[in-house]
Structure formats: structure tokens, C-alpha cells
Image: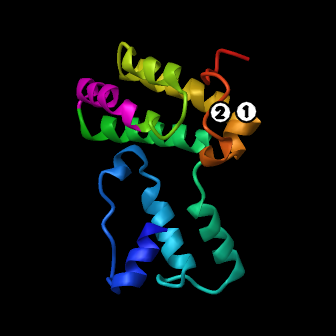
Amino acid sequence: DDAVRLIRHSGCAGVMIARAAIRAPWLFRQADAAIRLAGLGDASSDVNDRHRWEAARAEPTLHEKILTIRRHIDLCANHLDVRGAAELMRQRISWYGKSMGHVKSLKESIRTAADLESMQAAVDEWIEWAASDPEASTTPMASRGAGPRRDLDPSVS
């Protein structure tokens, strides 16, 4: 919404998304969708496109956010050596945690993983859990209120 407001106010051709994207990389998708829905981008009038952009504008579910973390790990592994990728993710996991609510055990499983493979396995366990949990896989994080009732943990039923 800020991107739309800035474009309308200034007539600029684009906006910069800064440090907020570090903890919420889906901001790019959301800003693009908001701009298109406001008729300021390359949005078609096709109803299916409109539904697609409305969905893209929504806050991601917990499951989608965990998938983003997994992708980040994979990208680090592709561009860094194994040790460097694991070290980088140990440092960066707290950024995601700020936009995900109470996921202390997820953050700790990444911080304490012995190696990159263990880290990937821990995140994969969370992905599997979140995909099977109706609330985690369908409810946007912003709609969940101030936060989960308890620390989310796939090992707790």
C-alpha cells in the first residue's frame, strides 16, 4: 500500500524497498500485486489475473514463510560453500522470526544445527508439519492475531 501511495503522490516510475525486505522477502511480491491492482502496473482486466494478484498481495501463511526459509537455505548452498551457507543462515534466521510470530524452536533448530544438511532436515520437518496443519497452511500470518497461543513446534501435537 505504501508503494501505491508513493507512486500516486509523486508520479514516480518505481519505488525502492529497503531493509524491511530482509525479514519479509515477500514484500516484493506484495508491492507488485498492490501496484497492479491499483491500475498502476501492467495488470490486465482479466478476472483471473485480478484474483491472482489479490492472492499475491495477501500476507503469506506460516507454511509459505517456512518454504521461503528453505529456499533461502538452498540459495545460500548454491552460492556459498557448505560451511559458509550454514553460518549465514544461523545469523539470518532471526530476521524471519520477527515476521513469523512465535517460532522459537524453528529458529533454534537452525541456529544449533550441526551442519547444513541437519539444518535442511529440520526445516523440512517444519514444512511437513505446516503443510498438514490447517491453520499454518491456510491462514495468513497477519490474520492470526497477535501470535500463536503457544510456541509452534511440529513435535507438539
Q: Which mark is residue 133?
A: 1
> Three-letter amino acid code at disc 2?
Ala
Residues marked 1 and 2 touching at CB (< 8 Å): yes
Q: Mark 1: give few (<14), some (14-19) or many (20+) Cα within 10 Å.
A: some
Q: Nearer the viewer, residue 125 or 30?
A: 30
Compared to residue 156, the image places residue 13 above or below, namely below
Q: Position of residue 26 (x, y in %)?
A: 47, 54
Q: Nearer the viewer, residue 47 or 6?
A: 6
> Three-letter amino acid code at disc 1?
Asp
Residue at figure coordinates x 54%, y 34% from the top left: 101
Q: Position of residue 106 (x, y in %)?
A: 50, 24
Residue at figure coordinates x 74%, y 17% from the top left: 157
Q: Which residue is mark 2?
A: 130
Q: Secondary structure at mark 2?
A: helix
Tell me which segment is drawn in magenta: 81-95
Q: Is residue 41 left or right of residue 13?
A: right
CA distance for labels 1 and 2: 5 Å
Compared to residue 111, the image places residue 63 above or below, namely below
Q: Is residue 21 magenta?
A: no
Q: Position of residue 133 (x, y in %)?
A: 73, 32
Q: Is residue 92 magenta?
A: yes
Q: How many badges with numbers are in the image? A: 2
